[in-house]
Amino acid sequence: MLVCLIFKDLLLERAVGMSEVCVELVGKLVEEMLGLSKEELSPSDNLISLGLGSLDIMRIAGLLTKNGCNVTFSELVSNPCMASWVNFARERSARSSSNGSPLLGSANYSKGDPFPITSVQHAYMVGRRDGQELGGTACHAYMEFECGSLDAAKLERAVELLILRHPMLRARFSDDGTARIEDKVTWKGLTTYRVEGAGNPDSRIEGIRQELSHLRFDIEQDDLIDVRLTVVSPKRTIMHINVDLLAADVLSIQVLLEDLAHLYDGTDLAPIEIDFMEYARRTGIGEDARNEDREYWLNRIDNMPGGPSLPLKAPMESVKRSQFTRMEYLIDSKSWKNFTEKGRQIGVTQSMGIAAVYAKALSRWSEDKKFLLNLPLFNRKPIHPDVDKIVSDFTSLILLEADCANAISLLELASQMQGRFQQDVAHSSFGAVEVLRELSHRCPNDPKKAPVVFASNIGTQFISNKVEDVFGPLSKMLAETPQVLLDHQIYDHKNGLLLAWDYVSELLDDKIAKQMFEAYCTAVRFYCENDWSEPFPDLLPPSQRAARAEANSEGADLGGGTLHGRFFARAQAEPDAPALRWGADGEATYGELAGRALRIAGGLAAAGVGEGDRVAVRLPKGPGQVAAVLGVLAAGAAYVPVGVSQPEARAALILEQAGASLCVDSTELARLEAADPPPRARRPLRARAGLRDLHVRLHRGAEGGGGEPRRRVEHHRRCRAPMGHGAGRCGPGRVGP
């Protein structure tokens, strides 16, 4: 309310000292948002450290620009103190008053003309195509509302009016990076399901939910919103809403729901004087990023990691169409208030505190402790007073690096990540989409990915009181995004803070995902109650802790023999028994796997690999990796595991320290399998005398990934040099750290 009153006053006072009015505006807004008085604020205080979030700063930039002070979100973030903001207000207001403001005005373009879309929209459009890795799915939000009784005819009319009101819901997208708006509503109308009197209504509702929550609109033919009803009883109706995020971001969905509630009630809404097409033209969407921002990221790009290497049950490329599953947890209001206050005391925002806990939890299951998170930014340039009413996707993305290797406490990690974010966001005109595209050009054989997302929606009420009054509470929600593995969203809730994970269940095992989420929630609760300088709690679930203790027990009976010796014995005894299964229908028998491993062993022998040599295996998880490991062992060598997502410099260091004579990657594997094996490798190999010091241990390091413990083969007799990260340490009495 205060913001609205300030804005009204400013419009009345535009003729009187605009620069000083803007200075006063900055002060009042900051006081309101932080809950602090002028006396408690110093001109040099870091306002982000005091608790101003991205959405708060975006609103401040918007209100300043609306009132003649043309300042950007990035400028405010990179200079987050009152002294700098006051200088912006004075300098930019004076410049604007002398030049006249070009920001206000009406749309000036021809209806139906194509207009440019954002790089993020284009990425969503490409990612939804079949054949894309982690693709084949639409970027969309699915919501369910638990209603009482609804008037279906009134709702259908309200949806039609909503589509007419917001042109982007009628958008049609083209491969050339443009979109156009249809004049007419093509929505097929309200579909109503009736489960009254059904023998198992819950099962029927779940079937409807599964169908609708994975919906993919035809973006060349369909309007980009769909509303349906399930009538359960005369007093219970479920409203299903699907919105394609090509046409709406989180703030837009709030606008859509609010407008739909008013239209259902028969409220006449004031027209919106600007739309996204005009916004795109006037803000230069689709134009090249600022050169300095591009150079900033290109100077860093060679040393950037990829996303966290989480334990996947299948290769990413094996999933033809991603489908997501949601987990949720509510942090109660008291605990969330405690968390917020503890962050404010040490100068860390709520969002970055949660992001740091998230990163640390992921690191416990990731092979890499330094990785990238993909962060959406909601930055609407305030070119018109009605810009907040526009429905479209204004999202930009930024890559945030998290280094969890040496971070002992939340204080350390959150401070590190906030400092990094503050520096990077000032160069966000060259966003994550562009950075990842550049990375793929530089490393076409091993492109880095950032499929793990952290989206903070703190600072806004997602479901307003009006929406709840008309449609009831939001009971279910799911977001799906192409080329994303795990998407974490946080929302303000009337009862605290809602934590939501949407993950691709075909890749992340449900059990492991649940363990990760529970560990993460445990850590958030821990820092709601404890000082942020306290070390991170143990994030391993009890079952994992017990499994690792058993795996590393010195008293385990190894039973003699070798890993590959036992395998080939089984292959000889039961060649037709299934040995490996992967994906939906992938399977290899013991005989098939043994034949493949022996061919690899023969190729290695022909290349000069012999007893005691060390051979690196750098392959994605799958049958090829298993065959390569067995082939290396059968050739008499010890294998050195190297993660495919390891940065090239790190991989090279591992190979050097391990003294690896050869690295089996995808190219080398194909060459080895094509080679003619020598005669000695044409039959199952017995354990050679020189390999009796090879033994198998179940192993996971203290900072290793999740899932079930994996087998590791270490060669002790001839190992002299440390084998680096991911390969353990060699010594006569211990395996691994």
Image (cartoon, rainbow, N blue to C red):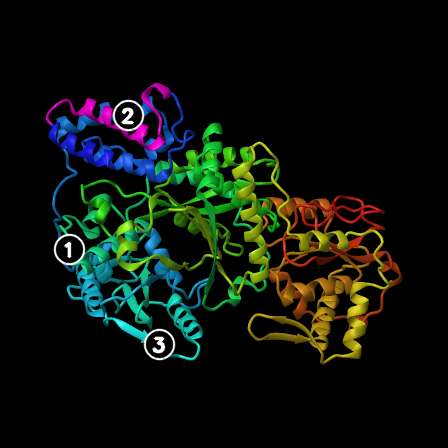
The image position of residue 156, as x and y in percent, is: 21, 67
Q: Distance between the residues labelled 3 and 2?
A: 57 Å
Count the labels in the image: 3
Q: Residue 196 carries which label?
A: 3
In percent of the image, x 31 and y 68: which residue is there? 235
Left or right of 483? Residue 588 is right
Q: How far apart are marks 2 and 1 (CA)?
A: 36 Å
425 or 158: nearer the viewer: 158
The image position of residue 74, as x and y in percent, is: 34, 35
Left or right of 648? Residue 709 is right
Q: Point out the tag, 2 or 1, that comes first from the N-terminus.
A: 2
Q: Report if residue 38 lies within the magenta region.
A: yes
Q: Point out the tag, 3 or 1, that comes first from the N-terminus.
A: 3
Q: Mark 1 points at which residue?
A: 267
Q: Which structural element holds mark 1?
A: loop
Q: Residue 666 carries which label?
A: none
Left or right of 581? Residue 473 is left
